[in-house]
Amino acid sequence: MSTSKKVVVIGGTGLIGSKAVRLLQDGGHEAIVGSSRQGINAYTGEGLAAVLKGADAVIDVSNMISFDEAVIRDFFETSSRNLTTAEKASGVRHHVVLSIVGTDGLVANPYMGGKQAQEQTVRASGQDYTIIRATQFYEFMDTLVDAYAVDGAVKVPAIDFQPIAADDVAAALVKVALGEPRNRTLDLAGPDRAPFEALTKSYLGSKGDTRAVSSDPVLGYFGASVETSSLVPRGDTLKGTTTLMQWLNK
């Protein structure tokens, strides 16, 4: 009996999605790239019935960028509702969605509010699922540094950080998708936890960037107030294996 499975990756052309597709293909599975370029649109429902036929699982890493919370919530709620409804109709056994560690406590940030709405829609759908909340990716460190750069220096929130490599996120999503639905939320983080300030210093130092880095307990995270543990897992956690230094030295 073949152990090969058909997995549809919604958002399969993005950073995480493209890596997940490659891992599935390398493992002998049928990986279907679900994106508007292929005529598959989770928000409108276009192409879902056809692409989900015979699928074992769906990995949803779709994304959209907006500063309007209503727009973000609508995108994630509608896409998740369309996906889970079509999955049930097609007999798909497992819906896996990528979310963010700390979402519950950071809903003042419009994007986090949208991800929380996505999670709630999936839980209420009646479809078997696993939600994986990941910490921030190493690949986004430049974006974070730019966001907190002020007057030739970098001032970051006084919080802990436990970032993870995108490769490790994709590997975890694939492993979970090929397994049985958990019908719960799992946290996923990198192997090392440290103050955001310390990790930022290491990151900039590796690039020869001599800007001063400091922390400020008053600073929030993109519009949301934070405490020390807001962006790190607080319980049992799946962990990636790639440290920041290993990632930087690739």
Image (spheres, helix red, strand yellow):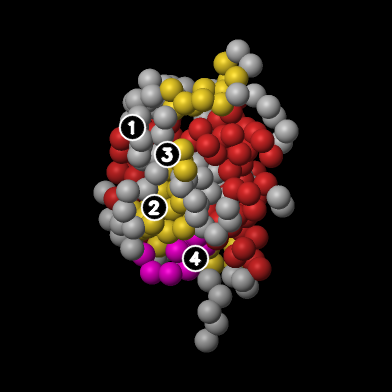
Which residue has dot 4 on it?
A: 175
Q: Residue at x 64, y 44 (%)?
A: 37
Q: Nearer the viewer, residue 161 or 189?
A: 161
Q: SS of the residue at dot 3?
A: strand
Determine the CA span between mark 4 and mark 3. 27 Å
For the stretch drawn in magenta, what is the main secondary structure? helix
Mark earlier in primary sequence (1, 4) = 4
Q: Is residue 182 magenta?
A: no
- Direction from residue 247 to residue 8 in the image, left or right: left
Quadrant position of residue 151: top right
Mark earlier in primary sequence (1, 3) = 3
Horizontal and vertical percent for residue 241?
A: 55, 59
Q: Residues within 10 Å of mark 1 (few under 14, many from 20)?
A: some
Determine the CA span between mark 1 and mark 3. 9 Å
Q: Which mark is residue 201?
A: none
Q: Can residue 37 be seen from the camera position used here?
A: yes
The residue type indicated by label 1 comes to: Glu
The residue type indicated by label 2 comes to: Asp
Q: Residues within 10 Å of mark 3 (few under 14, many from 20)?
A: some
Mark earlier in primary sequence (3, 2) = 3
Judged by depth in the image, the label closer to the viewer, 4 or 3, is 3
Which residue has dot 2 on it?
A: 187
Q: Residues within 10 Å of mark 2 (few under 14, many from 20)?
A: many
Labels 3 & 2 near each other (Cβ < 8 A): no
Which residue has dot 1 on it?
A: 227
Determine the CA span between mark 2 and mark 4. 14 Å
Spot the residue most to the bottom. 1
Magenta residues, start to end: 172-181
The residue type indicated by label 4 comes to: Lys
Determine the CA span between mark 2 and mark 1. 18 Å
Q: SS of the residue at dot 1?
A: loop
